[in-house]
Image: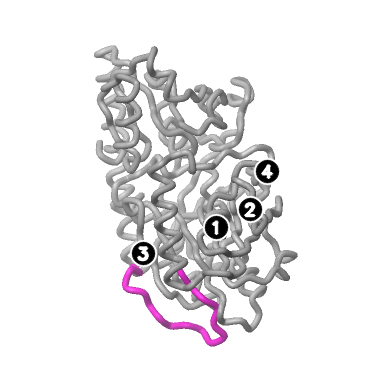
Amino acid sequence: MRHTHCPNCYSPDIEDFFTIKDAPVHSLAIMKDYNEAMNVERKDITMAFCNHCGFIFNSTFDTSIDYYTKGYEDQQGFSPTFLKFLTGVTNRFIDRYDIKNKSIIEIGCGKGDFISLICELGNNKGIGIDPAWVPGRTKPNPNVQFIQEFYSEKHGDLQADCISCRHTLEHIHGTGDFMKTIRKSLGQREDVILFFEIPCIVRILKIQAFWDIFYEHCTYVSPGSLARLFRQNGFEVLDMYLEYDDQYLYIEAKPVNTPSTKIHPLEESVAELKELTKVFTTKINSTLDAWRNKFAELREKKLKTVVWGGGSKSVGFLTHFDREKIIDHVVDINPHMVGNYIPGIGKKYVGPDFLKEYKPDVVIIMNAVYTEEIRKMLLERGLTPELIPLDRF
């Protein structure tokens, strides 16, 4: 499957700049069996750049695969660090736009953490829409209901004062059509606030964060490409900002009936973003080689090494290094992941208590934001291994 036009602006002026061969097509699917995990289909990831709008996407992404309806585990709310962050972001958003006693729709609500939180903190009523939602994963709230489906035009009749969409756009190939669907549902209204949160490609390119490139993410946005997507589909950008060590890009917007020409200071030009793709392609091989050398050193010293942080980052990381055969265990605090097997990799997720007997010498941390939380959990178990956060290596 080859996409010849930009999914954002529909321009045919696209070019590939980086390929990952034979990546597992799943990273967060539930795999109860080793053989099932190892039989996950593999396909190439082909990073493409649109010379018209600056959008970056997987030009060989297979849109026919069912990624989310057969068991999908993405809940981050087991981490105190993440909960503190999410609560702070939510309170700030509520206060900024007076999101109190309002109606909220969340597209791609996951297990319901955010829609439940914003309704609780603002006394709001909410509807979460996601095929991967699982009953009973958040505490009951009579003001929150869930629709276990993909968002589509048929949900356009659902009226809301605010539409949120967190960590979902990066999973959507047809981003232009998606935003058109949302805009159409709002009609002539100009009083609805949109609140999107998406991983930022700028950081990935700058530090060669290859672990954040995996198959389920078919879409990679920057402040510039995201703002252009919103403006071309009838929205005005109210604000954009980066959070979580610049990993997450936020956009706040509203529908307008006259095309907006407001440019946000955070936006980069298409040419500037293209230069960053050149930086990435120039440095990525040396970055990967440095990690291979590190694994050779760990093997030579016979140091027991684990990865901490399951899900997409561990799949993105181990896709490149599983053949090194140095990592036997991947740790995660989400109890719904523990005991399952990593798609395409075959390692079984273990909980932190497993390490009390295993006693690792080295812990490779998939997200540096959690370093102190992980250090504390290790100390509570009498462990003081060397900690290596990915982006601090």
For the residue marked with disc 2, what is the amino acid? Asn
Q: Earlier in the sequence, mark 3 or mark 1?
A: 1
Q: Reply above or below: 102 against 309.
A: below
Looking at the image, can residue 299 be seen?
yes
Q: CA distance from mark 3 to mark 1?
A: 24 Å
Residue at the right extreme of this rendering: 154
Q: Which residue is mark 2?
A: 141
Q: Earlier in the sequence, mark 1 or mark 2?
A: 1
Foreground mark, 3 or 4, reads 4
Residue 239 or 262: which is nearer the viewer?
239
For label 2, count other residues whose C-alpha is less than 10 Å away and answer few (under 14), some (14-19) or many (20+).
few
Mark 4 secondary-structure assignment: loop
Q: Start and end of the magenta stretch?
A: 252-268
Q: Could you say whether the residue bearing mark 3 is in a helix, strand or loop?
A: strand
Marks 4 and 1: which is nearer the front? 1
- Foreground: disc 3 or disc 1: 1
Residue 11 location, x and y as percent?
53, 68
Q: According to the image, label 3 marks what residue?
A: 241
Question: Mark 4: which amino acid?
Answer: Pro
Please say whether residue 259 is one of the residues in the magenta stretch.
yes
Find the distance from the CA under tag 4 to the CA under tag 1.
18 Å
Q: Categorize mark 3 by other alpha carbons within 10 Å: few (<14), some (14-19), many (20+).
A: some
Quadrant containing the C terminus in the rendered view: top left
Q: Which mark is residue 379?
A: none
Give the residue type that dot 3 points to.
Answer: Tyr
Picture quadrant of residue 179? bottom right
